[in-house]
Image (tube, rainbow, N blue to C red):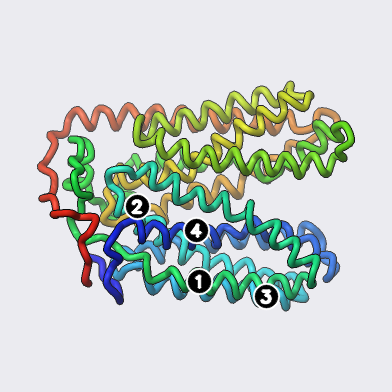
Amino acid sequence: MSSTSAPAPRNRWIVFAGAWVITFFIAAVAVFSVLVGPLGKANGWTSSQTALAFSLYTLCLAVCGIFSGRFADTYGAQKLMYLGGALFGLGWFLTGYATTPAMMYLTFGVIAGSGCGIVYNPALATTLKWFPDIRGKASGMLLAAAAIGPALLAPATVRLLDATDVGTTLRTLGIVFFVAIAACGWLVTAPPAGYRPAGWTPTPAQAVTSAGHQLTWRQMVATPRFGGLIAAFACAAAAGTMMVTSISGIAQFQIGAVGGMTAAAFGALVVSISTVANFCGRLSFGAIFDRLGGYPSLLISLGVTIAAMLTLTVAHGVALFVVCVVALGFAFGGILVIFPPLTGHSFGIAHLGINYGLMFLGYAIGGFVGPRLTGSFFDETIGYRNAYIGAVVIGLLGVAITVVLMRAARRESLAVTPVAAPVELPDADAVAVTH
């Protein structure tokens, strides 16, 4: 059952628009990388001290996403948008006053990270419930906001930083983030029970999923499929984050200065190229998911990642290196797009909030392991070659797990007799929902 404090919007695209704006701003964690250097310099902190804030942020995001997902499944997402938006903005605001690493860990890592987790998962899961017909495309378009956000917010942050100081910049961003999320939070409401878009007839597989495959989180975690999916998620995330989170440093070491461009400038350019490729990947994999399904989409993403990592071992020229960066950014963009609808397809959408919150732990594990492997495998003589090979091994493990899951899903689909689809609501896109 789902309930909210206000009537739902009359059109599902209004829900989507609200969630898109919210996702745009909560993706600002990438913007913190612009500020962490000046913040550390102003307070005399080392890079290892500031790096822990990112790890705490990711941990709190993942953990809070589980509890907020369960709350949203039962009571609706609106209240969580306000609570999470307040914590997210407050965390950034208070970080502007941080004078010790411990204070930064609390304000940014714990408070802002918790706020992001409270908002992200319910906004995503609730929105996808409105799009059973194009769940992949909806996931891709919504999460594209997470790629556009940093691309637009980072330059604005730099200009604000040049005009003021790091503390004022953080406090200003905190206020902007809270206002933006709070302004759109009321739009994030769930569809009515049995909702179906007008004119949409589910396929037999979709009918089975929607009507007879609604697992609670306890039922989900007891299935072998959950263990396989979370392991595949971790492998895909680890292989991708090994490169993506260190792309600037890798470019500077492996390629260096290019023409009149310094190594640092080339590293910054590569980051921009990767961001654009990531955005394109999110949009593309949404369409790929709807056309081919979740497991084939995941195999494509992993396959492209493996091929690009192998090529990087010999990519010492600018052109080939950039091609690899584009391929990796594109493939990595698909990971977060694939798993929300894949989780819904595998376990149903009735409890998607908490179910995907638990599934997201796979990404958190991969995001924690991947960047550390990059640093551990680096060698001054051979550079990042061993890191690339390590990513290939992890990617191949993800492929093996995905193939096993895909074959099991096919056997299951052949054994299950499709059940009747829910009764179609008249003009469902225009139904006003009152809870």
Dot placed on the residue nearer the N-terminal end, 1 or 2 = 1
- Residue 218 x, y percent position in the rendering: 30, 55
Dot placed on the residue nearer the N-terminal end, 3 or 4 = 4
Residue 224 lies left or right of residue 309; in this view the side is: left
SS class of the residue under badge 2?
helix
Within 10 Å of disc 1 (Cα), the crowding (few <14, some 14-19, many 20+) is many
Residue 289 lies left or right of residue 107; in this view the side is: left
Residue drawn at point x = 64 percent, y = 68 percent: 108
Residue 62: tell me if it is visible.
Answer: no
Compared to 94, does 48 lie above or below? above
Dot placed on the residue nearer the N-terminal end, 2 or 3 = 2
Q: Mark 4 = which residue?
A: 23
Looking at the picture, tell me which residue is in the foreground, 278 or 368: 278
Mark linked to residue 85: 1
SS class of the residue under badge 3?
helix
Residue 217 lies left or right of residue 149; in this view the side is: left
**C-beta proximity under 8 Å, tags 1 and 3:** no
- Residue 423 x, y percent position in the rendering: 10, 50
